[in-house]
Amino acid sequence: MTKSPRLALAGAGEKERHVATISTADFKNGMGLKINGKYYTLVEFQHVKPGKGGAFVRYTIKDLKSGKTINNQTVNAGTKFESVQLITREMQYLYNDGVAYVFMDNESYEQIPVDPSYIGDNAQWLKENDTCQLLYADTELLGVNPPMFIEVEITETDPGFKGDTVQGGTKPATIETGATIQVPMYLNQGEVIKVDTRDGKFVSRV
């Protein structure tokens, strides 16, 4: 397995980074937290002062690797957390060498191999030379996000007919990234289309 690429932060190596500890009083929506070795983003929170008992905080977090949202977590007011710096770096996807997906940092031009486990299902939307976003927590890579929209060629689908435009039906089509999506009946192999990578839906003909 390819080792997780680390992000070089200006001014300090990983060993020199000081752990930033915060309390619930420092909570801000969107901040990064490290809890039990996992990385999360704070979605929302609420300070609660009941009539009896001590004050507490109710909060919702999102696992940055799995994407799972965890609701209705509660801790006593003043509880300490480890905060992390969330960094998004734009990189150009170059190619898959059979072992890893290779990206190029748009700032340093360094080529970085990324193990498929960090990409998951998003691999089906990776098109060579497109700019992707790599998400880091401090220096550790968490995942890769493709562009929100991609323009791709249909490499395989059943022939379309002019009359199909009226019916509004769809058919499966394989695009150049290898993904299979539903497209309007009138489209043919070789045409270029725009796809929304968030839900894998056809947007328009290009």
Image (spheres, grey):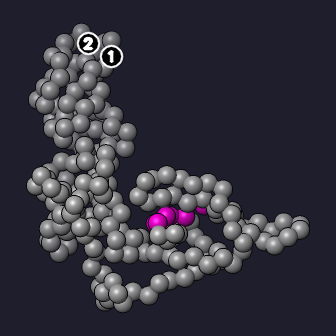
Q: Is residue 29 above or below residue 193?
A: below
Name the main secondary structure of what is drawn in magenta: strand
Question: Residue visible at 16% across and 31% down?
Answer: 154
Q: Residue at x 51, y 76 (%)?
A: 83
Tell me which corner region of the image, top left, top right, bottom left or bottom right, holds residue 47.
Answer: bottom right
Q: Earlier in the sequence, mark 2 or mark 1?
A: 2
> How many numbered marks does the figure carry?
2
Residue 152 magenta = no
Image: magenta residue range: 38-44
Which of the image's four quarters has the C terminus? top left
**What mark, if any, has residue 199 been given in the picture?**
none
Label 2 with label 1: CB-CB less than 8 Å: yes
Report whether 34 appears left or right of 98: right
Q: Please state which of residues 101 and 94 is positioned toward the viewer in this rendering.
A: 101
Residue 193 position, x and y percent, is 21, 34
50 vs 122, left or right, is right
**Quarter of image, res 202:** top left
Residue 8 location in percent, x, y?
A: 27, 79
Q: Which quadrant of the structure image shows residue 156?
A: top left
Image quadrant holding the N terminus, namely: bottom left
Identify which residue is drawn at 47% across, 70% down. 37
Q: Give, as a three-letter code, the residue at label 1.
A: Gly
Q: Is residue 97 above or below residue 125?
A: below
- The residue labelled by disc 2 is 164
Q: Nearer the viewer, mark 2 or mark 1?
A: 1
Image-based side of 34 in relation to 132, left or right: right
x, y percentage for residue 142?
36, 63
Looking at the rendered structure, the kind of residue marked 2 is Asp
Q: CA distance from mark 2 to mark 1?
A: 7 Å
Under circle 2, the secondary element is helix
Which residue is denoted by mark 1 in the rendering? 169
Q: Residue furthest top?
A: 163
